Amino acid sequence: MMNTDTPSEPTCYGLNKLVDEPTERIETLQSLVPSNEDTEQKQEIFKALANEDRIRILEILREGERCVCELQAALEAPQSTVATHLRKLKDAGLVKSRKQGTWRLYRTADTAAFELLNLAEAMRDDE
């Protein structure tokens, strides 16, 4: 959230000790803050990934397109639960779907979803 007000006295006091031009430094730092729209988009992706069943769905989709019935069987979950998870993943832009006859098939929207999962795995392995 961008603050266009004048920096507070305690902020300036701390920066006065750190840098010669605190106002310039504050302007530079504020220019680094992403817009609310950018932050909200990223937040939606991470919210979608913050559920173990949705992560499982993405891992299943790593192997290719699947219909809801296949995901239901794999997760041992009711159709309504799987559909809710797929909608959240779709709203976040992580999965896409297409209609084939009476079936709706789901796939990952971009391999970047797998990169995020791989990164999470790598971070866990570093502990």
Image: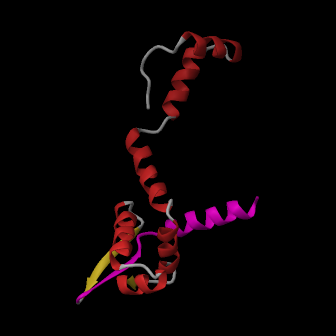
Q: Which residues are magenta?
A: 102-127
- Where 61 sits versus 89, above or below? below
Relative placement, left or right, of 14 versus 55 is right
Residue 70 is situated, as x and y percent measured from the top left of the image, at 41, 87
Tell me the quarter of the picture where residue 122 sits: bottom right
Taking the magenta stretch, the answer to whether it contains residue 93 is no
Relative placement, left or right, of 50 versus 44 is right
Q: Quadrant of the C terminus?
A: bottom right
Residue 124 is situated, as x and y percent measured from the top left of the image, at 70, 62
Q: Can residue 117 be seen from the camera position used here?
A: yes
Please give the name of the residue rendered at 47% of the width and 75% of the height, measured from the top-left corner.
57
Please give the name of the residue rendered at 44% of the width and 44% of the height, measured from the top-left corner.
39
Residue 27 is situated, as x and y percent measured from the top left of the image, at 51, 23
Camera-side residue of 59 and 75: 75
Q: Residue furthest right?
A: 127
Q: Can residue 65 be seen from the camera position used here?
A: no
Please give the name of the residue rendered at 44% of the width and 32% of the height, measured from the top-left corner.
1
Q: Residue furthest left?
A: 101
Relative placement, left or right, of 65 versus 62 is left
- Where 86 sits versus 99, above or below? above
Q: How is the image coloured?
A: secondary structure
Camera-side residue of 43 and 29: 43
- Where 31 sits versus 108, above or below? above
